[in-house]
Structure formats: structure tokens, C-alpha cells
């Protein structure tokens, strides 16, 4: 069974590999088809451009032939004008040419040109001979070797002294440069640290300003609430004052709690029976009993609390 399972697994792997290869082949085929379409479109475009170029080449060739014909015609005209100019020139300089036994003035010009070239050649030859003689003269002047060597040694020694002085000066300058570089690096590091500290302080200042604004807003809100509460308390005190004044004027004793006494929970009203008049009398008797009961407590508690 394991062998059969392994064979089945191997077959599945081979099938998956073939499937993957088939997908790759399909992808390559699609890419090739896309390339073929692109190539076909490019081919059409290039054929059109080739036809345009061929037409342009034909037009250019026709124009070139026309220009060549014009050039040949102009050349013939130039040759004719040259012949006429030579004839006129010969007629003008006929006596001059005859005096020199020349056929034409152009022969004289050619002879002059040759003579000028020969003169330039002689000048160059003389210049070469002069340079050669000058070199030999300098060589003869340098034959006094001991004196020349002493001069050369003195010049070399002077140059060595100058070079040593320059090197010492360069060393000092390099030392100063290194010191300045170190100072610059230290200054840059200090500047970076100061910048970081400044950024940190700026961030902290911004945070503190934000907290200060929040606290200011909270303080303003609490102050407004305090003012409202003080206004409410003042109103309650005024109301209590008016109540006590009214009770005093009407000679009514108000129930007052002792400092350590808690108020009682309100009792539900009792059911009344009988006629309205009897009910009214019972209510008056209850209020009188309450005032008589509250009188000892008020006497024990002393004067009422507050501004009364």
C-alpha cells in the first residue's frame, strides 16, 4: 500500500509539474502572440515609412538631377566667362607679355608663384642652418664644465634651502589646518547638541503652553462655575432671609434642625374623613401641635443659623 501510495504521489507530482510547464508554455505562447501582433503593427508602420522614404528618395533624386543639370549649365557659363576674361586679360596685357617674351600674363603669374615658393624654401633652409649654428654655439659655450657645475650646485643648494623652508612652512600650515579642523568638528558637535537641546526645549515649551492653555481653560470654567454657585448661594441666602423675615413678621415659628440633627423623611399625607370643616379644624390642630413640638427643639438649638 505504501508503494502504491508513493507511486500515486509521484504521479500527482509529475502531473503538477506537467501542468505547471503547460501553464508556462501557455504564458510564453500568449507573450509570443502579443509580440507577433506588436511586430505586425510595427511592420505595417515601417512599410508605410519605407514607402514614404522611397517616394521622398525619388523626389530627391529628381531634384538632384535637376540641380546637376543646373550645375553643369553654370559650369559651362563659368568656363565661357573665364575664356572671355582670359581673352580680355591677354588683350590688356599684350604689350607687357610681349616685352617679357611671354605668351600671356598668366604665364608670368605662374612664374612669380614658382619663384615665391622657391624663396620660401630658401628661407626655411637658412632658418634650419641658423638653428644648427646656434645649437653648436651654445654647446661651445657650455664647454666650461667645472664653473658651470659649481653654478649648478649653488643653484641646487639654494633650491634645496628654499624647498626645506617651504616644507617647514607647509608643515606649520597643515598643523594649523588640523587644529582648525578639530575646532570646527568640536564646534559642529556643540552646535548639533545645542540644536537638539533647543529642539527638545521648544517641544517641551510647546507642550507646557498646551497644558497651560488647557489649565487656563479649566480655570476659567471653574471660575465661571464658582461664580454661578456663588450667585445661587446668594440667591438662596436672600430667599432664606426673606422667609425668616416673613415668618417673624407673621409671628410664625419655623421648624429648625439642630446642628447634629438629620431631617426626617417626608411622611405621606393621612386620609381625612368627615366634612370639610372638620378636616380644616384637624389640619389647624396638627400644625399647632407641630409648632409646639418644634418650639423646645428651637429653644435648645438657639438662634437659627445664617444671616438672620
Image (cartoon, rainbow, N blue to C red):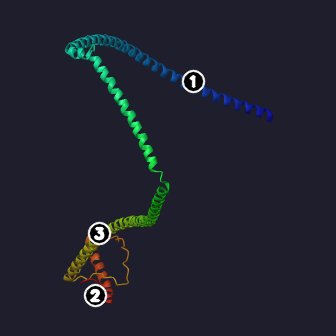
Q: Residues within 10 Å of mark 2 (few under 14, many from 20)?
A: few
Reading the chain from its start, which is encountered first: label 3 or label 2? 3
Nearest to the observer: residue 174 or residue 294: 174
| Depth check, front residue: 162 or 246 | 162
- Mark-to-mark CA distance, 1 and 3: 78 Å
SS at circle 2: loop
Task: Give the SS element for disc 3.
Answer: helix
Q: Name the residue under label 2.
A: 303
Instruction: Specify which label sits upstream in the sequence, 1 or 2.
Output: 1
User: Quick one: 272 or 41, which is closer to the camera?
Assistant: 41
Which is in the foreground here, disc 3 or disc 2? Answer: 3
Q: Name the residue tied to disc 1.
A: 29
Percent position of residue 107, x then y: 29, 17
- Pinpoint residue 30: horizontal percent, then vertical percent: 55, 24
Residue 89 point in image, percent of width and height: 22, 15
Picture quadrant of residue 271: bottom left
| Vertical placement of residue 238 versus 17, above or below | below
242 on left or right of 158: left
Residue position marked by numbered label 3 in the rendering = 220
Which residue shows up at 28% across the image and 17% down it? 106
Amino acid at each position: 500500500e505504501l508503494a502504491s501510495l508513493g507511486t500515486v504521489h509521484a504521479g500527482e507530482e509529475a502531473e503538477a509539474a506537467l501542468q505547471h510547464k503547460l501553464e508556462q508554455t501557455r504564458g510564453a505562447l500568449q507573450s509570443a502572440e502579443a509580440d507577433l501582433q506588436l511586430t505586425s503593427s510595427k511592420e505595417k508602420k515601417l512599410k508605410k515609412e519605407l514607402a514614404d522614404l522611397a517616394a521622398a528618395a525619388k523626389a530627391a533624386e529628381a531634384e538632384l538631377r535637376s540641380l546637376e543639370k543646373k550645375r553643369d549649365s553654370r559650369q559651362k557659363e563659368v568656363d565661357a566667362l573665364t575664356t572671355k576674361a582670359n581673352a580680355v586679360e591677354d588683350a590688356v596685357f599684350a604689350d607687357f607679355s610681349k616685352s617679357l617674351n611671354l605668351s600671356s600674363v598668366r604665364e608670368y603669374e605662374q612664374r612669380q608663384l614658382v619663384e615665391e615658393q622657391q624663396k620660401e624654401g630658401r628661407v626655411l633652409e637658412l632658418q634650419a642652418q641658423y638653428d644648427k649654428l646656434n645649437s653648436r654655439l651654445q654647446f661651445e659655450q657650455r664647454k666650461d664644465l667645472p664653473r658651470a657645475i659649481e653654478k649648478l650646485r649653488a643653484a641646487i643648494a639654494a633650491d634645496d634651502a628654499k624647498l626645506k623652508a617651504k616644507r617647514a612652512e607647509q608643515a606649520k600650515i597643515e598643523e594649523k589646518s588640523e587644529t582648525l579642523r578639530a575646532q570646527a568638528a568640536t564646534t559642529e558637535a556643540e552646535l548639533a547638541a545645542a540644536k537638539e537641546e533647543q529642539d527638545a526645549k521648544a517641544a517641551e515649551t510647546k507642550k507646557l503652553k498646551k497644558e497651560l492653555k488647557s489649565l487656563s481653560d479649566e480655570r476659567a470654567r471653574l471660575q465661571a462655575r464658582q461664580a454661578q454657585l456663588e450667585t445661587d448661594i446668594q440667591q438662596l441666602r436672600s430667599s432664606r432671609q426673606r422667609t425668616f423675615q416673613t415668618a417673624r413678621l407673621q409671628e410664625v415659628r419655623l421648624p429648625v434642625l439642630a446642628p447634629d440633627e438629620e431631617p426626617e423623611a417626608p411622611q405621606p399625607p393621612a386620609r381625612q374623613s368627615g366634612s370639610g370643616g372638620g378636616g380644616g379644624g384637624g389640619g389647624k390642630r396638627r400644625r399647632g401641635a407641630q409648632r409646639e413640638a418644634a418650639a423646645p427643639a428651637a429653644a435648645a438649638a438657639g438662634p437659627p443659623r445664617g444671616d438672620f
